[in-house]
């Protein structure tokens, strides 16, 4: 079905009034004016697939994505294209990919190279899901041209589960269907290669307890635009999983807000009428709702912005389009369905539907953004400076909690004095290394710089280097994977970080002023490991200066908050010490709290037995845990 996107209601009204006359003439027919072709890159190796997108622009200001358009290749022996614009390279050379509809034609030049696959990585390397929940994996191949290519859905890939009792692949798309609680290794085969390290899949026997809907940005949306929501499923072991694409989405009033597609349930809704409504999602029998308000503010202007006006060849960047309305309202419309991006010269730079611009060759290019028949232009200069240095942020030593993630960024510095964000550039390669260029395998970093700390049996933090490489230039930073689990309270509104070792304090904490350590014995903490013991003031300073998982708003917990941790994760008087054996917290000493006791003492919490009525003078030394008021995960 052809979908057309129209102007705001005010413009529709004006058009209607102007169109009415004594002659009552019929409106002119809507005709196609042009077709814009976009692709994320127009040069890739044999066997790699890329999808070109065709956007039809019509005389009434509407747009249509090119479903049903006629696609062809000038030379199918070099590259073939299917009816959806999926292009696969077959042999080296260049050919034009063409699209046609209603007599309007467009084309783009594709070059197929002889680069060959050298290694394959699977992301994420560790996935843990409840039985019955799909597990999504992505595969990327590093080619001899130094570029990673996504091969997740490549027609030549074969996804494999080592344990089909736990999980199977019904299609070769990286989506594993899980069946029974167990473990499985996930691997792929592609062009004679397997993954360097198979991914680990854990299928768990846990129960869904709650479903929560949250808007990606806001609950308020202008008339005629779309708004996206996500759903998070919470389970009996306090874990949380994004189940947006697996939820069934509805609206209680489709005249105000309706799902973008009744068949593709992905949390995207269209604003059809002014008013208030309620959207809902259902997942595995559990439901949730969220209010939505559709407003009709008076439109003022569209502004297209970019971080810089010039970029080097090979760099990618995102342009942003913002719609401004009377009253100071503004909305990011960079990826709205009734708007589109267009490059004036695909040989200089390409632009994707989400505003991602990739620099191809030197020159000036206009990147146009059209919204409601209004076009704004951003002129970009593509240059050829030489990369001289790469800076990774955060640069200072930082922690990533167990089973948590941290977004890194890379900035390139050039010989002409300019600097550019490189994180989304296809030529940038990320890696995790030990001191001597040995690969670090306790975690993984994705193609866009997201570090993931995998759960392990280790009770002590691991230290490693992050490296970003592009055009033979390297940048590094130092980081640590925390081994202690980040714990929460019953309501998941607090996050607790366990005690730190002296090595953590010496190399990764802002705080260094400790005088005593306690050596754990293997029963209440990792054997022979030494943890810092602090006075009340030192513990306060530790939490005030703590930077963990990218957050810096930690504090000492109250007595009730920390006592509740013991009740949640242990709550027994035996010597099993569940907080150490199950959560890897060292608990050989009592922990400070901010609450006063008698005689100027402060209350302590014993996490081995939950013993109450403990207190100590502020100048004595004990363990410290830090807490923040929002979940880290």
Image (cartoon, rainbow, N blue to C red):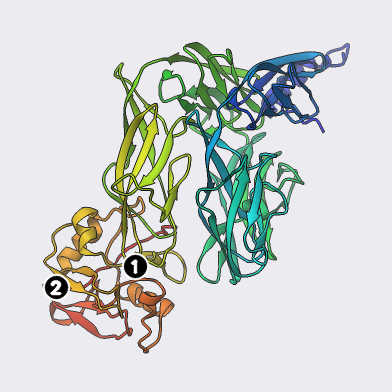
Q: Nearer the viewer, mark 2 or mark 1?
A: 1
Residue 592 quadrant: bottom left
Residue 202 location (% of width, % of height):
56, 64
Q: Earlier in the sequence, mark 2 or mark 1?
A: 1
Residue 336 position within the rendered picture, expressed as x and y whole percent measured from the top left: 62, 32
Q: Quadrant of the N terminus?
A: top right
Work out whether residue 399 or residue 14 is closer to the camera in this orientation and state it: 399
Q: Is residue 465 above or below residue 44?
A: below
Q: Crowdedness of circle 2 by 10 Å Cα count: few (<14), some, many (20+)? A: some
Q: Which residue bears the numbered disc 2?
A: 618
Q: Looking at the image, which residue is at 78% across and 29% down? A: 83
Q: In the image shown, does 308 or 297 lie closer to the viewer?
A: 308
Left or right of residue 577, residue 375 in this image: right
Toward the front, the furthest residue is 192
171 sits to left or right of 203: right
In the rendered image, which residue does mark 1 sit on?
459
Q: Which mark is residue 223?
A: none
Secondary structure of the residue carrying numbered label 1: loop
Q: At 66% across and 24% down in the image, what residue appears?
A: 91
Nearest the eye: 544 or 366: 366
The quarter of the displayed image where residue 371 is located:
top right
Image: 440 above or below 117: below
Secondary structure of the residue carrying tag 2 is: loop
Q: Is residue 557 above or below residue 590?
A: above
How packed mark 1 is, by other alpha carbons closer than 10 Å (few <14, some 14-19, many 20 or more), is many
Residue at mark 2 to residue at mark 1: CA–CA distance: 29 Å
User: Total number of numbered labels?
Assistant: 2
Relative image position of residue 183 (x, y in whole percent): 57, 66
């Amino acid at each position: 079905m052809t979908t057309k996107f129209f102007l705001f209601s005010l413009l529709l009204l004006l058009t209607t009034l102007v169109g009415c006359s004594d002659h009552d003439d019929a409106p002119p027919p809507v005709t196609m004016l042009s077709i814009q072709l976009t692709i994320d890159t127009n040069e890739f190796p044999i066997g790699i697939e890329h999808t070109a997108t065709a956007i039809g622009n019509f005389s009434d200001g509407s747009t249509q994505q090119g479903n049903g358009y006629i696609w062809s290749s000038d030379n199918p022996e070099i590259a073939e294209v299917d009816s959806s614009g999926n292009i696969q390279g077959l042999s080296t050379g260049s050919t034009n990919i063409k699209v046609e509809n209603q007599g309007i034609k467009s084309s783009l030049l594709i070059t197929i190279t002889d680069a060959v696959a050298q290694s394959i990585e699977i992301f994420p390397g560790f996935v843990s899901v409840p039985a019955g929940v799909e597990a999504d994996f992505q595969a990327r191949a590093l080619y001899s041209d130094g570029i990673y290519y996504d091969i997740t859905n490549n027609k030549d890939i074969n996804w494999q589960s080592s344990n089909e009792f736990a999980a199977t692949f019904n299609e070769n798309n990286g989506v594993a269907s899980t069946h029974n609680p167990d473990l499985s290794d996930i691997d792929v085969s592609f062009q004679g290669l397997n993954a360097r390290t198979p991914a680990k899949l854990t299928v768990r026997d846990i129960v869904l307890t709650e479903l929560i809907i949250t808007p990606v940005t806001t609950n308020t949306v202008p008339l005629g635009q779309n708004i996206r929501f996500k759903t998070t499923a919470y389970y009996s072991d306090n874990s949380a999983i994004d189940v947006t694409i697996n939820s069934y989405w509805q609206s209680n009033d489709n005249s105000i807000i309706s799902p973008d597609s009744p068949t593709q349930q992905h949390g995207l809704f269209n604003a059809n009428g002014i008013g208030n409504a309620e959207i809902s999602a259902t997942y595995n029998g559990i439901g949730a709702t969220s209010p939505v308000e559709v407003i009709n503010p008076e439109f003022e202007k569209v502004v297209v912005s970019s971080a810089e006006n010039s970029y080097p060849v090979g760099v990618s960047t995102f342009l942003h389009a913002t719609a401004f309305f009377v009253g100071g309202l503004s909305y990011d419309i960079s990826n709205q369905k009734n708007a589109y991006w267009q490059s004036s010269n695909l040989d200089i730079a390409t632009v994707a539907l989400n505003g991602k611009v990739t620099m191809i060759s030197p020159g000036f290019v206009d990147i146009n953004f059209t919204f409601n028949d209004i076009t704004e232009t951003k002129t970009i200069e593509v240059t050829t400076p030489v990369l001289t240095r790469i800076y990774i942020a955060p640069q200072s030593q930082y922690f990533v909690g167990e089973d948590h993630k941290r977004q890194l960024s890379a900035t390139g510095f050039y010989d002409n004095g300019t600097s550019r964000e490189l994180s989304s550039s296809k030529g940038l390669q990320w890696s995790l290394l030990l001191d001597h260029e040995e690969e670090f395998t306790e975690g993984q970093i994705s193609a866009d710089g997201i570090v993931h700390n995998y759960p392990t049996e280790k009770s002590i933090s691991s230290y490693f280097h992050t490296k970003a490489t592009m055009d033979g230039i390297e940048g590094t930073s130092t980081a640590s994977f925390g081994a202690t689990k980040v714990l929460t309270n019953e309501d998941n509104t607090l996050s607790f970080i366990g005690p730190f070792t002296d090595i953590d304090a010496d190399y990764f904490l802002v705080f260094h002023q400790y005088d005593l350590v306690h050596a754990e014995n293997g029963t209440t903490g990792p054997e022979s490991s030494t943890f810092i013991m602090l006075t009340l003031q030192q513990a306060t300073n530790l939490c005030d200066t703590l930077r963990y998982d990218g957050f810096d708003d930690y504090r000492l917990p109250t007595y009730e908050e920390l006592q509740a941790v013991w009740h949640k994760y242990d709550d027994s008087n035996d010597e099993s010490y569940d907080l150490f054996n199950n959560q890897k917290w060292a608990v050989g000493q009592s922990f400070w709290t901010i609450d006063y006791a008698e005689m100027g003492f402060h209350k302590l919490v014993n996490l081995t037995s939950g013993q109450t009525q403990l207190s100590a003078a502020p100048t004595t030394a004990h363990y410290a845990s830090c807490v923040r008021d929002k979940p880290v995960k």
